[in-house]
Every structure is written in C-alpha cells, then in structure tokens.
Image (spheres, rainbow, N blue to C red):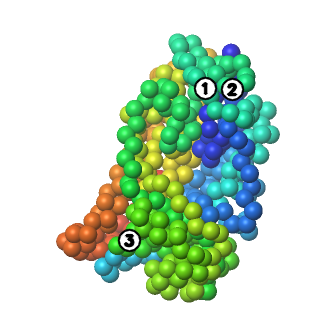
C-alpha cells in the first residue's frame, strides 16, 4: 500500500486537512494540478474567517505565520435591507474580541502549501489531474498522468464544486446555478472603515464591503449575470462611482486597487459526503451563496472534523471503512445543511420584488436588531458554528 490517504485537491480545504494530520501515523499523498502562486499586491478574493476557524488554523500551525499586517479584524457589521430594514452586530456588545477576520485567499493558500510541503508524512504529487479511479474492498487506486497508479485506503475529494472524485465515486450532486455571479474588487476608501463590514440587500443584488488593513475594502457584489456584465464593462473610475453610490457614501470616494473579476454562484447539495473509501470536503461536499460569508469556514470545519475522526482511530482500524467515514458524515450533517438552506432562503427572500415580502424581510431585520438575545445567538453561530 502506497498511502493511507490520498487527498485530491490542494486548495484551502484539502491542504488544511493534510496539515491537520501532521505528526500522525498516516502516509498522505496530496494530488494537485499546480502549486499556488503568491499574488502581488492585494488579492481580489478574500474570506471572512470565523474565530473558530482561526483557532483551527492556529492549531495546525498556519495562523501564526500569516502576515498580521495583511489581516483585518471585523469589530462590527452593518446590514441594510432594500426598504429601510437595518441590523447591527458588534463584537463589543456580544462580548467578543472580533466577529471575524478578513484574510486574502492567496496568502492563506500559500502558507498552507508551504506548511504541508515540510511535513514528513506528506508526498506532494503536482502536475496533473487523475485520469481514473478504482475502488475495491481493500483499497482505492488512482491513475495519474505520467506516473504509475498510486494506492491508498481512503481518497478525499477536495477538488471543488465540479469534483472529479465525487463523479468517479458515483455520488449524486444537485447543482442549481443561481443565474448570478459574484463580482469582486478591492478599493481604497476616503473614509476610515473602522473595521466595520457592510452589507446591502439591493434591487440589483447583494453588495458587501469587507475591511482590509488601512483604508482598503474588498467588495463582493452578488448580482444577476447581466448586471455583473455591466459592472465588468465599466472602467475603473466609473466602477468606483457606481460602488460608492450603491454604498450611500458610507466610505467616501473610492479608488480601484485591483481590477474587477467575477465567478459564478451555485447552490449544490450532495446525496452523501461519504462512500466506501471516499470522503468529500469543502466545495466538493457543498456550495453556498456567498452572502453568509461561511463558504470556506464550512470547508475548514470539514477538514477539522475528518482529521478528528482519523486521529482518534485505533491503529488497527481501516480509515477507508464506511463505518468509520459515517462518523465524519454525522459530525457534518447539521451545519452545512442549516447554512446552505438559510443562505438559499435569504437569497430568494431578498431577490423577490413582491412588495409584501419586501415589508416582511425588512421588518424582520428591524425586529432582530431590537432583540439582543436573537441577535447575539446569530453572532455566536457566526463565530463558533453553534447556537
């Protein structure tokens, strides 16, 4: 047997799983088409990392090596509906030091990659995607281009929403495009953001501005495909004016720091996250709308849960046994389901132009803002993944 675990996909979820298993008895192969490159300047793709996931990254030796000058804590959040609804979150009011941390995707990826490269129990197989996978009672084999087939006892699909591993394993996935894209860009702003995150539910989509160090913010504008096209067609100055106007001047005049990019938004739910000798983590297991900011946090919690199951396994147990993998599936049954459908429901609720629904959703924001118990429960979930 070549390996105990074969992780296909060296992105954030896959690499964090490998890092979480450092110092264990497991022999791990990490299969990835290409090594990540460090982005110069600000990365247009950022993530809001919950304190719970920051703790996980600290436990596996990643967080403390990230450049603190490139990370911004979120101390408060302001949410605005499309008809006067308002909701405010504050770390101070909730007894927390911060609600989340805004971190550039590329810098997290690079630090994870370099950490895993130094692990004695990991073999990095870079330069191609698997060509075939075969599962039998004793092992799983992967054919890699230009190499002999490799064998393991468990293959982990961490290869994204269009997961090759998931398809090869015959795990059904319900993928529903939203007909929307997330337009991302970074801006310097005329006013200090004071480590406040902003989110506006608008007729033309959901606009979020997230704080970065200094007077810099990262934008995610989730909107219909045709509106996304119109944003991408704007020159830098016109885009700055459009975003500043949509934000109601909350951050003053804006200046473009990184060009706008866009990525498609999809809802995806799988029939199961495990099968004999196969487990799925990250976007291979679930895809959600970015309005909740929980996408990569779910992936990190997947990695943490699977690593916990494997670390606690007696040496004589086979990590690919379905009875073992069902423990991971049970641990991850509730949170992704709740976050997926709550996020999906909010997107549909605020996407409706029905005047009655507009009144209901904005009244709901105002009511939640006036009920500290409910508001603080939402904050606790965002921080820890538990009510």
Side of 333 where 192 appears, left or right = right
Q: Earlier in the sequence, mark 3 or mark 1?
A: 1
Q: x, y percentage for residue 267?
A: 40, 49
Observer-nearest residue: 105 or 93?
105
Observer-nearest residue: 306 or 349?
349
| Cα gap from disc 3 to disc 1, whole angstroms | 42 Å
| Cα gap from disc 3 to disc 2, whole angstroms | 45 Å
Q: Earlier in the sequence, mark 3 or mark 2?
A: 2
- Residue at 50%, 40% in the rendered image: 162
Residue at label 3? Answer: 204
Q: Earlier in the sequence, mark 1 or mark 2?
A: 1
Does residue 378 appear anywhere in the picture?
Answer: no
Residue at label 2? Answer: 145
Helix, strand or loop at label 2? It is: loop
Q: What number of labels is visible?
A: 3
Does residue 120 appear anywhere in the picture?
Answer: yes
- Residue at 53%, 31% in the rendered image: 165
Side of 252 where 230 appears, left or right = left
- Contact (Cβ within 8 Å) of mark 1 with mark 2: yes
Q: The C terminus is located in which quarter? A: bottom left
Residue 51 higher or lower than 140, as above or below? below
Q: x, y percentage for residue 32?
A: 67, 37
Q: Residues within 10 Å of mark 1 (few under 14, many from 20)?
A: few
Helix, strand or loop at label 1? It is: loop
Residue 239 picture quarter:
bottom right
Observer-nearest residue: 36 or 29?
36
Residue at label 1? Answer: 131
Observer-nearest residue: 73 or 256?
256
Residue 232 higher or lower than 178, as above or below? below
- Residue at 73%, 24% in the rendered image: 146
Helix, strand or loop at label 3? It is: loop
């Amino acid at each position: 047997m070549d390996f105990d675990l074969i992780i296909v996909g060296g992105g954030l979820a896959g690499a964090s799983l490998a890092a979480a298993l450092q110092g264990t008895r497991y022999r791990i192969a990490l299969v990835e088409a290409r090594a990540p490159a460090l982005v110069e300047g600000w990365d247009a793709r950022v993530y809001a990392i919950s304190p719970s996931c920051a703790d996980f990254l600290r436990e596996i030796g990643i967080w403390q090596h990230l450049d603190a000058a490139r990370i911004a804590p979120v101390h408060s959040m302001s949410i605005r509906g499309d008809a006067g609804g308002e909701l405010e979150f504050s770390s101070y009011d909730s007894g927390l030091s911060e609600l989340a941390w805004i971190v550039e995707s590329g810098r997290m990826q690079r630090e994870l990659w370099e950490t895993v490269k130094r692990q004695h129990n990991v073999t990095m197989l870079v330069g191609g995607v698997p060509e075939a996978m075969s599962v039998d009672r004793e092992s799983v084999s992967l054919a890699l281009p230009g190499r002999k087939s490799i064998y393991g006892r468990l293959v982990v699909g961490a290869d994204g929403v269009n997961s090759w591993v998931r398809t090869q394993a015959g795990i059904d996935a319900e993928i529903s495009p939203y007909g929307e894209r997330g337009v991302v860009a970074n801006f310097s702003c005329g006013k200090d953001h004071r480590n406040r995150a902003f989110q506006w539910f608008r007729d033309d989509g959901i606009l979020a501005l997230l704080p970065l160090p200094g007077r810099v913010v990262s934008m995610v504008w989730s909107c219909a495909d045709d509106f996304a096209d119109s944003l991408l067609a704007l020159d830098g100055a016109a885009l700055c004016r459009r975003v500043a106007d949509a934000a109601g001047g909350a951050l003053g005049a804006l200046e473009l720091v990184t060009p706008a990019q866009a990525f498609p938004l999809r809802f995806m739910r799988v029939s199961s996250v495990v099968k004999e000798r196969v487990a799925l983590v990250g976007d291979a297991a679930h895809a959600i709308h970015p309005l909740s900011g929980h996408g990569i946090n779910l992936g990190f919690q997947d990695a943490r849960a699977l690593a916990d199951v494997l670390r606690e396994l007696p040496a004589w147990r086979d990590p690919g046994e379905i009875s073992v993998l069902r423990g991971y599936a049970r641990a991850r049954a509730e949170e992704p389901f709740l976050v997926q459908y709550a996020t999906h429901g909010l997107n549909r609720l605020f996407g409706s132009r029905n005047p009655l629904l507009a009144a209901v959703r904005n009244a709901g924001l105002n009511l939640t803002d006036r009920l500290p118990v409910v508001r603080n429960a939402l904050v606790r979930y965002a921080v820890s993944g538990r009510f």
